[in-house]
Amino acid sequence: MLKKLKSETSYQLLVTIPALVLFIAFTYYPLISTLRYSFTNWNGFKSTYDFVGFDNFIKIFKDQDVGSSFYNTIYFAVFSILIGIVLQLGLAVLLYGKFKGKKFFRAIFYMPCVISQLVASLTWLGFFQYSGVINETLVSLGLSVLVHDWIGNPESVKNVLIFINIWQWTGYGMVIYLAGLTAIPLDVYESARIDGANNIQQFFKITLPLIMQAVTINLFIGITGAMKIFDMPFVLTKGGPIGASKMLSMTIYDNAFLYQRFGYSSAIGVVFFLFIATITVVQIVVTRKREVEY
Amino acid sequence: MQNDRGNKLFTFLKYALVITGSVIVAIPILYILISGFKTSYEISQPLKFPASPNFDNFMKVINNKTVMFSFANSFIITGVSVFIDVILCSIASYSIGRSNKKIFVFLYLFFLSAMMIPAVANLTSIYSIIYQLGLKDTRLGLILVEASMQIPMGILLFTGFIKTIPKELDEAASLDGCGYFRRFFQIIFPLLKPITFSYATIASIQVWNDFLMPLLILSDNNKKPITLAIYGFVNEHGADYGAIYASLIIAMIPPILFFLFSQKYLYSGITAGSVKG
Amino acid sequence: MKKLVSTLLSVLLLGTMLLGCSSKAEVVTETSKAPADGTASTTAADASAATEPTVIKYVSWMTNGEDIPFVEAFMSENPDIIVEYEAIDGTNYDKLLSVRLMTDDAPDVFLIQWAQYAKYAQENYLMDVTEQPSMALLQANSGLANAFTMDSKQYGFPINTNGGPLPIYYNKVYFDKLGITPPTTLEEFYSVCEKIKADGVDPLVFGAQDKWPIEMFFRYHQYTNLLSEHPQYANDLYKGTMLPSEFYKSEFEMGEDLFNKGYISKASLTLTWPQSVPYFIEGKAAMLPQGPWVPSMPEFAELDPSVFQLAAFTSPATPAADGKIYAMGEVDRSIVVSSTTKNKEAALRFFNWFTDKTNLAKYLSAQSLTTVLDLEYTINPIIADHIKNISSDKYQLIWSQDVQLTPAFMTDAMFNGFQNLLAGSNAKAELERLDSEFDKTKDAIIVLK
């Protein structure tokens, strides 16, 4: 039997080739170009440019714009992920067990992720702008004292973005957790109950380890998604006010297309990638270790 | 008795939380739905309901040939790319998820690395590859690019869930004389239904709603997906918001239908009771 | 699994059938008013059966089909040329067009936004059109012609221009009610704002979320006194003989002043430009400073004249020492021919037809555009006075700078500056920020002459 499984390796390698080819041709090759440009001073359009070694990379660490947009991105990501995990897992657990109309509620929570980020952002803009639905409702309810410039105020704008992000993705994360929960055979819980474990013990000692795959996935999607966020702040505030909602992806975009420093922008992209890669590799190693195989 | 009251409180909280949450979640969606029935002027008045449900916007959209063709285009582009992705990613993940060999760990991270980069700056490179392969202004070119972009997510999801399928099944199947491919397609793949559908739903949404890649690759109006057809209602100094909302509503329907259709498979549970002991 | 496959198959079948119908539709002329219907290939072409018609590609950003009737008019007069028209979304226009130029996939004739002109000309993507007949019309306005001249040659033609202080739109009914006459000086303007504010209405509103509406208003104001002393201000900034914080000082201080006095609606910061129009129509704000395209907008078409009558006055500005008002003129759309076109003769014919006096006038009238060139076209009566005003000797328009500042500075830094003012910053901080932003973009400045 071992012999048969050993020659499997050639099959195993073979089947990864189609995905690999497609991936390299259309996704990876452009990334390599970006890496290459990060060592040049190309402005994105001229037919000539020079290689400048690591100059761009050094500039990054002196650039205030990069620094502040990096801070904004981390703030956004950390809160989105932390609050997100709690809500996603919580909802999944609540809507897994006995719950009237759980199919209906699952669908409702899932809906937002179906709407493109662009459309969702435009809709929320109509709610959060100073003359928008939220303020108008507050005024008509006699609560004008609560009226606030939600996205026009540098203090509150990031929190609004976090709210919208959570609104859009909680349902999807919940579905992944639900898929993980339904994969757990019910008899595992049976035996645990017989052994006298209560609900909370069951959750932490049985449920959580058995859905670690789902945790890995959601955490990874959450981290990479939050770090790369672009459409939402772009549409809602275009990075304002006073740069309070400018995310790193927008800095990359601006440098490439507005300041005409394509090479520099590519360098920022590379550094950012290395940063995210480090975090996610650590995340994956940690959570995969806790994954329990059947 | 204490337990009972505690339970009742807990149940009440449960329902209260979920219902409040759903209301917050649903409000913007309702807003989009209602806006589709408003006239342009009414749309600029967010709090008011339309005087009477106005179907003009929907008629405008349905009677617009270009928009209806773009609908078909969206179906084709999304359907084919996701189909390709499901097949390619699931079988590649079968190897990556099962084997402990270093090369597969490397491949896993290699695929995932692409998810960590904001894609905005890759336009010129992608266009030049498409152009050189003669795929400019073709739906095939767009399908290949879209499929390629969804691969990392597919590898991530499938690899994660392959692990929940017991290795014993593999061994049992090969003992029965199943070849590699038969083993995968007839036994393993059907068991992956929940994650296949989770992946298919999210990948199809990403492709269905993408406007940057179609904008880059396609020129012919008859090939454009619905995300671009919406631009037809936008002119330089304004837009026909009524028609745009109507198009958005129509565009939202297929992904929702697909999700509802997937419900059955999403929660089917992978191995409940299939292997004992 | 089976169900999945069968669903997908039926989708594919359905899709292919629909597309089968669509490819037949391509052959038939589509002159319907459907938006975004770009493939305007006409069967009138086989009227002249002798030679194969030449096909040229024309690209612009009028995604609502505004250019289509114009293109079709050309084709009906020139049956041996087929123009394949494509409209690319305006916000991504520069990126997408640049990508095509760089991959040697340029359209034969296309429109460009002003910021692209020098960039494309310098990289030799544009054909030299100095000798074309329509250029005589351009040469008649030396300032404008100078803007297009690089190395004594011209590579494009201006379709429409905007220039000088903006029209400020107001509701005549409301002004009459308060007994206000349109102001002609800045002092009068301020007192008008004060009257309106006292009535409990926001005097001014901007769609500042989109950034450009507010910057546009102040840009045409502001530095008129300095502009008369430094007509080549970009050169001065580039050489360092003048700092941005000096040059733009009065502009930003005016913005700060207007905001602090409460003359600018608080809603502006988060209001998009399309939303500022209904805000104005509903009377929440009394004045809307905007461009000449406003009167043709559908929102004004069916208003009750006893409640709302659209009118405009020229935004007042301070004259320079010589009594004239100096302001920057702005070319909006230009038409260019690709230097790598394989259909030179056909492309040039289209170019010349487009820029012919009669045809161009029709184009401008149809899309409610304005130009400073000597053409006879219909100007919307609401802004007729304003345009006449701007074209008079009282205004000195400066069309170009020998040194082209980067879009990053001209648009982004300036836009952000005004947005920040609305968000509570002050002029001093913004002017300082302007200086450091300018420093950052210095290396990308193009020296044209």
Image (cartoon, rainbow, N blue to C red):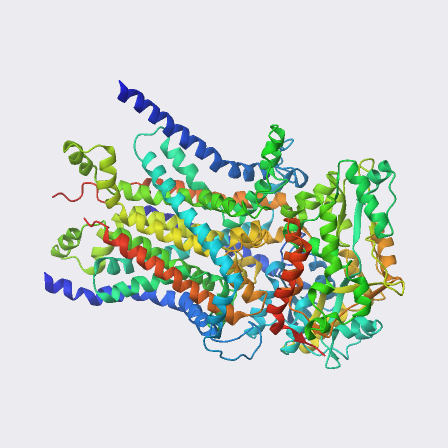
Quadrant (top left/top right/bottom left/bottom right) for the N terminus of chain B: top left
Provide residue C125's location: percent of width, then percent of height.
63, 76
In the image, is B187 to the left or to the right of C288? left
Figure check: C235 above or below B16: below
Measuring from the top left, give residue C153's x and y in whole percent: 74, 80
Query: Which residue is outermost to the top?
Result: B1
> Could you tell me if residue C49 is visible in this image?
no
- Give the vertical position of A97 relative to C445 (above or below): above
Q: How many marks?
A: 0
Q: Nearer the viewer, residue B58 or C304?
A: C304
What is the x, y in percent for residue C238?
Answer: 68, 73
Left or right, residue C235 beside residue A226: right
The image quarter containing residue C266 is top right
Which image quadrant: the C terminus of chain B? top left
**Res. A290 visible in picture:** yes
Q: Residue at x 23, y 50 (%)?
A: A290
Foreground pick, A31 / A85: A85
* Residue at the (77%, 60%) spot, across then down: C363
Q: Residue at x 82, y 38 (%)?
A: C174
Q: Nearer the viewer, residue C419 or B245?
A: C419
Quarter of the image where one finds residue A95: top left
Q: Residue furthest front?
A: C428
Q: Nearer the viewer, residue C73 or C228?
A: C228
Counting from the top left corner in percent of width and height, residue B130 is at 48, 69
